[in-house]
Image (cartoon, rainbow, N blue to C red):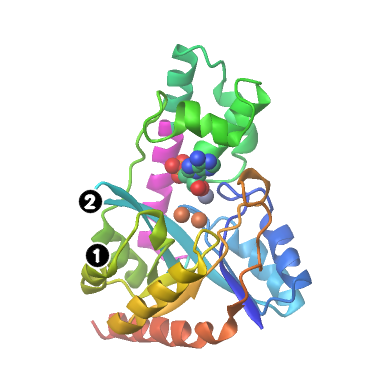
Amino acid sequence: MAVDLHLHTTASDGTLSPSELVHKAVSLELSALSITDHDSFGGIDEATAVAREHDIELIPGVELSSYYRGQDVHILGYFIDYRDPVLTERLRYLRESRELRARKIVEKLSDRGAEVTWADVEKYAKGEAVGRPHVAQALVDRGVVGNISEAFELYLGRNGPAYVPKYVLDLEDIFDIIHGAGGLASLAHPNHWGADRKVIEKLSDRGLDAVEVWHIDHSEEDTRLYTEIANELGLLLTGGSDCHGARKKHGFVIGTLDIPDEIIEPLRDRAAEIRAEHAAN
Ligand code: AMP
Ligand code: ZN
Ligand code: FE
Ligand code: FE
């Protein structure tokens, strides 16, 4: 059976609610899914309840951002105790920073004649973690741009006039926080920044446990290459579609990558080891 371990809901910048997403996974006959919203576990309780009714495994996950050598690096956390107080507090701070940043982006846009208000953005950012896709949607709504991609190209992208960097955690902090909450850390979509063997080895030395080898933006060659690197370095494999629903160019890609369910047990075992190590310390 197939699994999908990288999915976003309305708790961050996805367009399906946690319940809708789980129902979708059930209809696709997946055996497990993980919800990995940006900086939030806001979707997990609702998803867990629905998953229980339908006999599908829901793995609590999260996607955290960092910068490494000038690149945007995303780390996925799995099998986490999502009620962990340290983690909860850190995520709360990240979400507060996201809101301040989004408000700054709105100001910059208005200064440049791209008329959009915080209220417009809030309409879409109903969940917990507000991000650039919500601002992009508001710009589309206002007719400032024709579509989401154009919003990033003209305003919100890294070199755009309304770009505001996001407050992020250090990578080592991220590994510690995830491990401290009993979870394991996987390197998300490594091809987005061309992560190579050398750099993945460095991350592995610092605490990385796994690599996301299946991803909607990975070619078969990428998947083969990253699987080889992970195997060489003794890292586990993860994979997911990174489905955001309607707001991303790929659309509703949940479940389309045929990721084998055999990857789950090694991940579960590793998380159990991490918890045992932390309990012993
Ligand atoms: P943020 O966390 O607020 O910096 O926003 C990051 C989100 O914006 C991620 O989900 C990205 O995939 C999405 N994103 C980044 N660039 C683009 C783009 N050119 N078109 C559509 N979505 C994008
Ligand atoms: Zn996202
Ligand atoms: Fe990501
Ligand atoms: Fe993602």
When asked about the image quadrant of residue 260, the answer is: bottom right
Relative to residue 65, is residue 141 drawn left or right?
right
The residue pinned by badge 1 equals: 199
**Residue 88: image location, x then y, percent:** 42, 57
* Residue at x 22%, y 51% (from the top left corner): 69
Q: Position of residue 221 (x, y in %)?
A: 46, 70
Taking the spot 45% from the left edge, 87% from the top edge, the residue there is 266
Q: How would you rate the neighbour count of disc 1 (Cα within 10 Å): few for under 14, some for 14-19, many for 20 or more?
A: few
Residue 59, picture quadrant:
bottom right
- Which secondary structure is most common in the magenta stretch? helix
Cα separation between marks 1 and 2: 10 Å
From the viewer's perspective, is residue 104 above or below residue 189? above
Q: Which residue is mark 2?
A: 69
Towards the viewer: 11 or 72 = 72
Name the secondary structure under disc 2: loop
Q: Residue at x 58, y 56 (%)?
A: 8
- The residue segment tinted magenta is 83-101
Quarter of the image that includes the N terminus: bottom right
Q: Is residue 260 left or right of residue 98?
A: right
Q: Position of residue 150 (x, y in %)?
A: 56, 31
Q: Would you say the residues marked 1 and 2 are in contact, meaning their CB atoms lie under 8 Å apart?
A: yes
Q: Is residue 159 left or right of residue 215?
A: left
Q: Secondary structure at mark 1?
A: helix
Give the residue drawn at x 61%, y 50%.
14
Q: Is residue 79 visible?
A: no
Magenta stretch contains residue 167: no
Residue 188 at x, y percent in the picture: 42, 62
Amino acid type, callout 2:
Arg
Q: Nearer the viewer, residue 191 or 280?
A: 191
